[in-house]
Image (tube, rainbow, N blue to C red):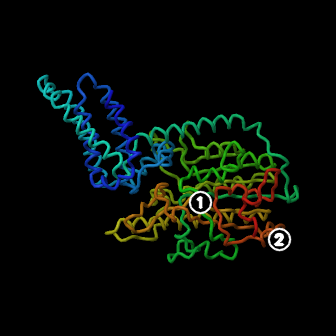
Amino acid sequence: MWYVIFPFATEFVAKILHGLSEIWSIWAPLAMIASLTIPLLILNEKTRIVKFVYLFVIYLSTYINIIHIIFFNSEISTSSFISIFETNLREAEEFLIHFRSLKLLIVTLLFWGIGIVLFLFSNWLPCRRQIQIRIQKKYLIAAFIVTYPIFCFGDHRYKYPFEKLLFAYFEYRQDLVRNADLLGKRAGFKFKNIRSLIKSSEPQTYVIVIGESVNKEHMSIYGYNINTTPNFDAMKSELKIFREVRSAYCHTQKALKGILCFDEDFANGDIITFFKQAGFKTFWFSNQYTSGNCDSLTAMIGDLSDVKKFINKSHYRTKLSSNYDEKLLEYLRGSLQDKAKKKIIFLHLMGSHLPYSKRYPPDFDVFKGREENDKSIGVAQYNNSILYTDHVLRNIIDLVRILNDNSFVLYFSDHGEDVTEGQDSPHSHVESLSTPAMFDIPFMIWCSDKYKSVNKSFIDGWDMHKIYKTNNLIYSVVEMARLMFDEFDARKSIFFGG
């Protein structure tokens, strides 16, 4: 079993010798190929099952890491695996279509072609060839002992893919089981002494719009030199535009924990349960994909709402196409007509999720890239998705405006997106890269005339240039709804100290 134990032992040694990484960086790719293929030559007919396991554990995990590097120029991370585990077939299909390339095809064919050929070749050899290989085995083992350490502590991006996959999945499953257990106990969860600063007889309608992958630097209302937000620009005087808000994370599920859970932990209570206990009827309408039995915490919390609809339950058998975010408007109209006196409505947009070209209808294909430059085409498509989001948000605000209730519309994005034309731009959001563009997000509030008159002193105290991270945004939402409870911490709200 040396060939199973050796990789793990070598990883341990490699970590100790990490300081030598620069010496081996040039040889890392060659060492990787040798260290992965040599065991397939060493193993004989009797170890076919072990060899098969090796091929689809060590070999597969390395392939996943290499593809991640090709896509994003960075090593795979825990967040990457969370995205993999929570992706359904429809979303995976869109991702692969967007990132398809000749380089990906060549790497895939070579990587798996070599592995499968060696796997089959070593089992088809005649007995005399097997004897010859046994004689040569010591040299192969020696080559493996030399090359695998170079692979492990050579180029840092290639390190420990199997270890990352194993522990990322373990952490993901542990969190999923914990949240499911907490969900079962949610009915007994109680917030202490919830109270309102607004008269209970006053009708209240609050709309929270959660965007997806929007970098505020691509919005003209934030100074972008391309007119991507004409509707926001036209109604600028009606909006409160916060300039220095950043996402705490560049991965959706991590980012939304701080938005939907107190202190980023489901155990401390969630936003839906809180508003239900405060006497609000809750609505959750999402254009995001769901993942069946492996649904994220976001979907779990959304499912707690009194009324909920996930409109993008795409399935590989039905081949349903993605809905545009405008589809959410019909559900918003219905909820606004609901007779409940106090309502809070969450709209989870698909926004600017990859692939950008799938996020807007043909009428919004306004900006064009240069055909010889793939990066410029991607930027143009991203800008079109922002243009469409601007249109959807204007319609949301207009629908809420008609009510003439004590109401507001809050819009922000879960995280940003790196969408430049530079060679190093991944056109995505990758935790291991963490460029500023992946965290810079829009944060805008529209308030009805009645809300502004009732809460004038509160609004006058807002600081549009306050530096704020969204990992405690739930406290800001509670304060905007003019609610308090015993555990409320005003210091965690964006409105504190204004």
Q: Residue at x 63, y 36 (%)?
A: 180
Residue under the image location 16 percent in, 31 percent down: 136
Q: Is residue 316 left or right of residue 182?
A: left
Question: Could you tell me which secondary element the residue under label 2 belongs to?
Answer: helix
Q: Nearer the viewer, residue 121 or 454?
A: 121
Other residues around mark 1 within 10 Å, as few (<14) / some (14–19) / many (≥20):
many
Q: Nearer the viewer, residue 10 or 329?
A: 10
> On screen, 192 above or below 415?
above
What amino acid is at disc 2? Ser
What is the three-letter code of the residue carrying label 1?
Ser
Left or right for 498, reference 416: right
Residue corresponding to mark 2? 457
Q: Is residue 258 above or below residue 85?
A: below
Residue 127 in picture, x, y percent from top left = 13, 22
The residue under label 1 is 247
Image quadrant of residue 216?
A: bottom right
